């Protein structure tokens, strides 16, 4: 027995050693890795430190830590750490819910619960809600091999989108990019808008968009029998919404059925791009080329049109998206944030994707210099403006000596003396010269961005669909019994003009292989060498090589309201005041120039909401008085006005301004 024990003892030791070796060879789960624990720990620590102090010294230290954390995140192998499974999607969604504290004043079903009796709030008119750009969720219905893994999953919206962007960006981009020839789905891919109120109640877990509006309508008695959420694929041009999805036909039928069932006309509540699209629908529904409803259809079926934060004159940031894939949102990330963004999703990739979304191009600035100003002055310049006029929508830096201010050519590199200031029309021209023929052709076939002051021409434009999305080139319908309410926030710094730079040839040659922050926005050069664009803006030949442009983040001057290459004016944080209020102001086009643009004299009620943030740090969305572009959908005062309008008490909502919009519109 003793010999047996001696023979077994080494064997046992050998087994123990082998188990230890096997254990050492097993890969440590990612959630136990030191880098993962460190990253999560630093993130939580940053949140706690921010809540504890906002002093300059503390913020400086936080910024240093943030930059270091960004570098750590950039080096993570996310595809290994978070494989594509339903379990991971659920984990991300649950993590978001756990990490987000409940805001102090983010109380469900308010203010309807408190004011329902006092204001006699109850369901009366049928309600149609039209969301803005990027608000509607998009899901995949494709069954090809490349799409099966995404079937019935959100490609846009929810944490499923976040996972796709981080772990399978190429496939995500392929599914979201439209065909450059048709502007529709590429072969083998089918993306459709999510239907129902779920389409835009929350963008991702915890971040509401329309949820507060839906809650309050439900509180006073509305349900899916009396309200309709008209979600749509915001990537498509307005014309292709009808071609592919019959969107306008369905919207027309829904409104007609609502009147047949209730005997009442509908109240249309639109936000952002939805507000600028609805007048297009009204022209379409009347026209023999569209719904063929006749000139009385709007007056017979629409009680009120609520325009909430509508960019009626477009937005400058749409221009920079199409030029270089940049806005204030990307520039505000800081140097390390920009590095991470560029590594995962470069400017060249973003620009190519955004140019394929022809719905977004509907928001390019409209009205030319008459609305946005000249090189010398703009309506929203401060009195006796001492600095650069907002009329210079794009300005290039540096300004070489001897530059030709009168030239209409496009700069070709950073040493080109043609670098200069560009008005809005010249900026659009620059964008078109730097885009390809297919984009220019689609733009000209769908939209127009000028001004028409001839009654005869406006009558002709009734039969020209390219004019219907521009309120300065089309007329409101013959609907004297309809009311238009224009609600928007003011007091939020909003991007208005930009400082650009041109990359050197050396940067052009090296950007393809590196993740720089100053290049790679152009397409393949062969796309720009053969054909001329079909557009009213392109008066000059396209450069044989597209120019690599980028917002110069080094340009900052607090006195001139310039930060990271962007100059700010008043607005709602997304749309400048000029675009929000020009059409609706008493001195604006729909009232002062009603003979041209509002011949039926439709009543226009403009009401501004001053942006006021809650003092509570737990109010991550700003609180009940926040009025920026999205959060106005949760503003209590705006909500009460909306509820009164749908309840039949719209006469209680009256005109109010805080800004200088009337003086701007009068210039």
Image (cartoon, rainbow, N blue to C red):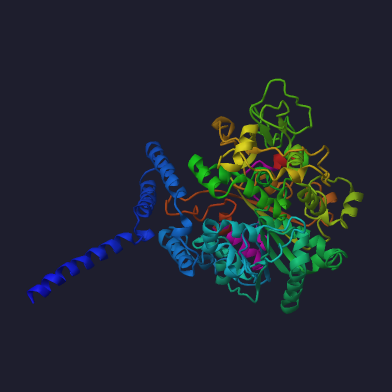
Q: Is residue 656 magenta?
A: yes
In which image quadrant can residue 270 be found? Answer: bottom right
Q: Nearer the viewer, residue 325 or 388?
A: 325
Instruction: Say whether residue 302 is left or right of residue 216.
Output: right
Residue 394 drawn above or below residue 252: above
Question: Residue 510: x percent and y percent?
Answer: 60, 37
Q: Residue furthest right?
A: 456
Q: Nearer the viewer, residue 23 or 48?
A: 23
48 drawn magenta: no
Which residues fall within the magenta stretch? Answer: 636-661
Q: Residue 637, image x and y in percent?
A: 57, 57
Total marks shown come to: 0
**Where the C terminus falls, by quadrant?**
top right
Residue 219 image-quadrant placement: bottom right
**In screen coordinates, is 41 left or right of 439?**
left
Residue 374 in sight from this viewpoint: yes
């Amino acid at each position: 027995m003793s010999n047996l024990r001696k023979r077994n003892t080494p064997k046992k030791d050998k087994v123990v050693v082998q188990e230890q070796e096997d254990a050492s060879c097993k890969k440590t789960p990612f959630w136990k890795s030191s880098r993962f624990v460190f990253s999560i720990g630093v993130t939580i620590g940053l949140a706690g430190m921010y809540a504890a102090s906002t002093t300059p010294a503390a913020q400086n230290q936080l910024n240093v830590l943030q930059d270091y954390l960004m570098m750590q995140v950039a080096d993570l192998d996310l595809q290994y750490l978070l494989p594509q499974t339903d379990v991971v999607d659920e984990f991300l969604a649950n993590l978001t819910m756990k990490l987000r504290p409940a805001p102090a004043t983010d109380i469900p079903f308010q203010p309807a619960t408190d004011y329902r009796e006092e204001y006699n709030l109850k369901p009366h008119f049928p309600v149609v809600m039209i969301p803005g750009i990027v608000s509607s969720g998009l899901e995949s219905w494709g069954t090809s091999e490349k799409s099966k893994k995404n079937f019935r999953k959100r490609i846009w919206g929810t944490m499923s989108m976040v996972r796709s962007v981080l772990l399978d960006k190429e496939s995500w981009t392929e599914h979201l990019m439209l065909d450059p020839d048709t502007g529709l789905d590429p072969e083998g891919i089918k993306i459709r808008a999510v239907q129902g109120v779920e389409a835009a109640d929350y963008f991702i877990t915890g971040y509401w968009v329309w949820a507060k509006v839906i809650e309050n309508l439900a509180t006073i008695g509305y349900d899916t029998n009396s309200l309709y959420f008209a979600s749509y694929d915001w990537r498509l041009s307005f014309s292709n919404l009808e071609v592919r999805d019959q969107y306008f036909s369905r919207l027309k039928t829904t409104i007609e059925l609502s009147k047949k069932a209730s005997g009442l006309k509908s109240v249309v509540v639109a936000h952002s791009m939805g507000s600028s699209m609805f007048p297009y629908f009204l022209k379409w529904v009347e026209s023999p080329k569209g719904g063929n409803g006749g000139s009385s259809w709007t007056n017979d079926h629409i009680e009120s049109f609520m325009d909430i934060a509508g960019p009626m004159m477009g937005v400058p940031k749409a221009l920079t998206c199409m030029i270089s894939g940049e806005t204030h949102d990307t520039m505000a990330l800081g140097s390390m944030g920009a590095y991470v963004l560029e590594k995962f999703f470069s400017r060249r990739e973003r620009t190519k994707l955004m140019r394929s979304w022809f719905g977004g191009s509907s928001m390019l600035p409209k009205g030319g210099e008459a609305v946005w100003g000249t090189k010398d002055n703009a309506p929203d310049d401060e009195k006796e403006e001492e600095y650069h006029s907002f009329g210079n929508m794009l300005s290039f830096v540096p300004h070489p000596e001897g530059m030709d201010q009168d030239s209409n050519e496009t700069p070709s590199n950073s040493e080109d003396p043609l670098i200069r200031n560009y008005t809005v029309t010249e900026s659009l021209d620059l964008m078109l010269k730097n885009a390809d023929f297919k984009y220019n052709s689609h733009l000209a076939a769908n939209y127009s961005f000028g001004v028409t002051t001839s009654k005869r021409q406006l009558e002709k434009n009734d039969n020209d669909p390219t004019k219907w999305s521009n309120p300065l080139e089309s007329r409101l319908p013959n609907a004297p019994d309809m009311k238009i309410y224009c609600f928007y926030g003011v007091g939020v710094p909003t991007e208005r003009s930009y400082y650009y730079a041109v990359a050197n040839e050396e940067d052009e040659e090296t950007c393809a292989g590196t993740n720089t922050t100053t290049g790679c926005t152009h397409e393949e050069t062969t796309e720009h060498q053969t054909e001329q664009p079909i557009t009213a803006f392109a008066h000059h030949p396209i450069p044989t090589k597209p120019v690599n442009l980028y917002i110069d983040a080094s340009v900052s001057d607090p006195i001139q309201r310039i930060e990271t290459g962007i100059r700010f004016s008043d607005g709602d944080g997304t749309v400048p005041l000029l675009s929000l209020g020009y059409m609706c102001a008493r001195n604006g086009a729909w009232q002062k120039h009603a003979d041209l643009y509002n011949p039926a004299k439709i009543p226009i009620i403009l009401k501004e909401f001053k942006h006021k943030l809650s003092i509570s740090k737990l109010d991550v969305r700003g609180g009940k008085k926040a009025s920026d572009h999205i959060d106005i959908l949760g503003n209590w005062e705006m909500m009460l006005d909306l509820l009164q309008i749908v309840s039949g008490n719209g006469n209680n909502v009256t005109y109010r301004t805080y800004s200088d919009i009337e003086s701007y519109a009068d210039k």
